[in-house]
C-alpha cells in the first residue's frame, strides 16, 4: 500500500513548513540574544556613567563648599579624574556594544534574508550613548574651567 503525503493549502509539504518555522524561530532567538547582549552593555554603561558623573559632581560640590580648598594639591583633582575615567569607560562600553550588535545583526540578516526591523534596544543604547557623551563633556568642561 502506498503512503499518501498530505500538503498544506499553500502547496508546501508539512516537513518544509515545519523546517521553515523552526528556521524562523531560530532567527528570532538569535536576534533576541543579540539584543540581550546589547542591553547588558547598556546596563554596564549606565552604571559606569552614572557612578562616574556622581563622583565627579559630588567632589566638585565639596570643593565649592571649601572643604577641600585648604588642601591645594593634585589629590583634589583625583576624584574628578576618576569620575571622568568611569564616564569614558561607560561611553566606550556602549560604543563597543553597539558596534558588536550592528555587525552581528547585519551578518544575521544577510544570512537569513530577513527584513531589517527597528530595535528598541539599539535605540536605547544610542540614547544612553548621547547622554554619556554629554555628561562626559560636562565633567571635562568643569576640569578645564577649574
Image (cartoon, rainbow, N blue to C red):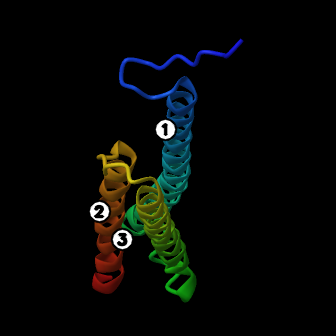
The picture places residue 123, in percent across and down from the top left corner, at 31, 50
- Compute the Cα span from label 3 to label 1: 42 Å
Q: How many marks?
A: 3
The picture places residue 24, in percent across and down from the top left corner, at 49, 38
Is label 2 in contact with label 3 (beta carbons under 8 Å)? no
Categorize mark 2 by other alpha carbons within 10 Å: few (<14), some (14-19), many (20+): few
Q: Residue at x 47, y 59 (%)?
A: 111
**Residue located beneath label 2 in the image:** 130
Q: Nearer the viewer, residue 81 or 98?
A: 98
Which quadrant of the figure contains the C terminus? bottom left
The picture places residue 49, in percent across and down from the top left corner, at 46, 60
Query: Would you place residue 1 above or below residue 103 in this image?
Result: above
Is label 2 in contact with label 1 (beta carbons under 8 Å)? no
Categorize mark 1 by other alpha carbons within 10 Å: few (<14), some (14-19), many (20+): some
Query: Would you place residue 12 above or below residue 26 in this image?
Result: above
Which mark is nearer the camera, 2 or 3?
A: 2
Q: Nearer the viewer, residue 111 or 11?
A: 11
Q: Residue at x 49, y 85 (%)?
A: 72
User: Quarter of the image holding residue 106?
Assistant: bottom left
**Residue located beneath label 3 in the image:** 136
Q: Secondary structure at mark 2?
A: helix
**Residue located beneath label 1 in the image:** 24
Which mark is nearer the camera, 2 or 1?
A: 1
User: Quarter of the image holding residue 102?
Assistant: bottom left
Pointer 2 or 3: first along the chain? 2
Q: Residue furthest front?
A: 1
Side of 144 where 111 appears, left or right: right
Pointer 3 or 1: first along the chain? 1
Query: Would you place residue 73 above or below residue 130 in this image?
Result: below
Q: Secondary structure at mark 3?
A: helix
Amino acid at each position: 500500500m502506498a503512503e499518501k503525503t498530505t500538503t498544506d493549502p499553500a502547496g508546501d509539504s508539512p516537513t518544509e513548513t515545519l523546517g521553515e518555522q523552526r528556521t524562523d524561530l531560530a532567527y528570532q532567538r538569535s536576534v533576541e540574544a543579540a539584543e540581550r547582549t546589547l542591553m547588558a552593555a547598556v546596563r554596564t554603561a549606565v552604571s559606569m556613567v552614572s557612578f562616574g558623573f556622581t563622583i565627579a559632581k559630588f567632589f566638585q560640590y565639596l570643593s565649592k563648599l571649601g572643604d577641600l580648598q585648604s588642601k591645594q594639591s593634585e589629590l583634589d583633582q583625583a576624584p574628578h579624574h576618576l569620575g571622568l575615567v568611569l564616564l569614558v569607560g561607560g561611553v566606550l562600553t556602549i560604543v563597543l556594544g553597539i558596534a558588536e550588535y550592528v555587525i552581528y545583526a547585519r551578518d544575521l540578516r544577510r544570512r537569513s534574508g530577513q527584513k531589517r526591523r527597528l530595535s528598541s534596544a539599539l535605540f536605547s543604547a544610542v540614547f544612553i550613548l548621547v547622554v554619556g557623551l554629554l555628561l562626559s563633556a560636562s565633567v571635562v568642561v568643569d576640569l578645564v574651567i577649574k
